[in-house]
Amino acid sequence: MEIIVFGGGYVGLVQAAGLASTGNEVTIAEVDDDKITQINSGQAPFYEPQLPELLSKGVEQSQLRAVKVGSDEFDKRLKSAEIIFIAVQTPESSDGSADLKYVFEVVDTISKLPGDLSDRVVVMKSTVPVGTGDAVENRFNTHGKNPIVASNPEFLKQGSAVRDFMQPERVIIGSENERAQELLSYIYKPFMLKRERIICMGRRSAELVKYACNAFLATKISFINEISQLAEMIGADIRDIRRGMITDSRIGDQFLFPGVGFGGSCFPKDTISLVHQGEKFSVPMRIPQAVDQVNKRQRTWALLNLKDIFKELKDKSIAIWGLSFKPKTDDLREAPSVYLIEELIKAGAKVRAHDPIAIDRAKTLLAKHSSKIQYFEDMYAAAESADALVLMTEWHEYRSPSFKKLSEILKNKIILDGRNVFGPEITRQYGFRYRGVGIPENLK
Ligand code: UGA
């Protein structure tokens, strides 16, 4: 099929490269020249495992290309595209609602095509508030155009996006139109040879499913984080509580890892967006509201513990392992580490940071604090002479470090484990003071 994807960002790129891999003719429509050059040379503008390989393959086999919006090649590709995905960014406006200006720009561009466009399927891929499909359809109508507008939310996780695309747990098609269902089922079928997992529903329902899923997963995380706070006060071990919970198959074992709070471009933004959408329809979204509040509190975990241990953080040197909001990505959006670093610097401390991938991005994002942060290529070098070590992201390389080495190089033998990867059992053997999330220091 001939497919065009507007937006070579995270969602658009994985979508385009994935669909090109099964023999579709896919074009990415972009406005950013650098991105276009990168994509056409088989590189991803961000770190995502397996994506460069998939992109290179698509480009080499001429199944995939990026073109500039407005170019002759773009016009040609748009004219023949049967399915048009919209995967452009929808930034937060000052009042917290999603800004749809880029989406509408795309609608206006598509509307320049001749004819009524009733044979085209336009698919919203970006996460957008419920009712955006209607707004997009109305905008087309004002131009005298009548394409089929569908919603097809994405459920990819950063760090495993290619695998998630190739083996989706389900594909949701939000359209009651038969042609939309048929064309979209056709392009997703190759990814579900073992078991059909396509679910069709109305457009508004599809739009809401996306928020419901993200908010529910975020709820699980905030729930276990809140229980972990109680565990710390009571002197209980959250790891045992978690083990006791997850054996109940109704509860399940996923997204119940306590930590320093959820980050990224999705959970924080989508939870708040759901609260706003509820307000609009006078249905208070009390649970998502609480989830957000608990998460904001959880982000302070490491800072509060450091203050509790040192009382005064001025001139303290704190080593931080892990900057990205989760492993296998260089994304720092809403990363708990960024919050911690800013607070530490405000308190007069100095930071020694390590991350396997995200250092360059951190240098740019935190440029104004450059004199207070030192970055290290080697994780042990970051810990050298530091007053304490804080683990913020559970990258594989941090999971079984040499505690002997750490005990020799850290100034104080203090570890704050924001992801519970070490445990007091091993760290105590090396004489460390250890605190985990929901694992109190004086745990018997
Ligand atoms: C999330 C969803 O998991 C995807 O299904 C969805 O498609 C995506 O948002 C999106 O809307 O685009 P992502 O943000 O990439 O994916 O990452 P997650 O693996 O969900 O992790 C989000 C945050 O929760 C991370 O900061 C992670 O450290 C934290 N987390 C996750 C926990 O603190 N505990 C857990 O048990 C799981």
Image: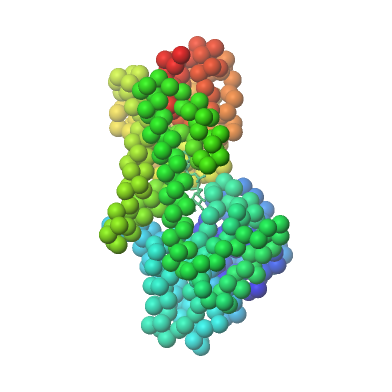
In the image: residue 93, left or right of residue 199: left
Residue 65 percent across, percent down from the top left: 62, 66
Q: Is residue 162 visible?
A: no
In the image: residue 371, left or right of residue 2: left
Residue 93 percent across, percent down from the top left: 32, 59
223 over 309 or under it: above or below: below
Q: Residue at x 56, y 40 (%)?
A: 249
Q: Residue at x 65, y 70 (%)?
A: 186
Q: Residue at x 67, y 53 (%)?
A: 53
For the N terminus, the image quarter is bottom right
Q: Residue at x 62, y 47 (%)?
A: 49
Residue 258 percent across, percent down from the top left: 46, 33
81 over 396 or under it: above or below: below
395 over 443 or under it: above or below: below
The figure's colour scheme reads rainbow
| Front one among 249 and 427 | 249
Q: Looking at the rendering, which quadrant does residue 219 occupy?
A: top left
Residue 24 percent across, percent down from the top left: 67, 69
| Front one among 172 and 308 | 172
Q: Residue furthest bottom?
A: 115
Q: Is residue 168 visible?
A: yes
| Front one among 422 and 65 | 422
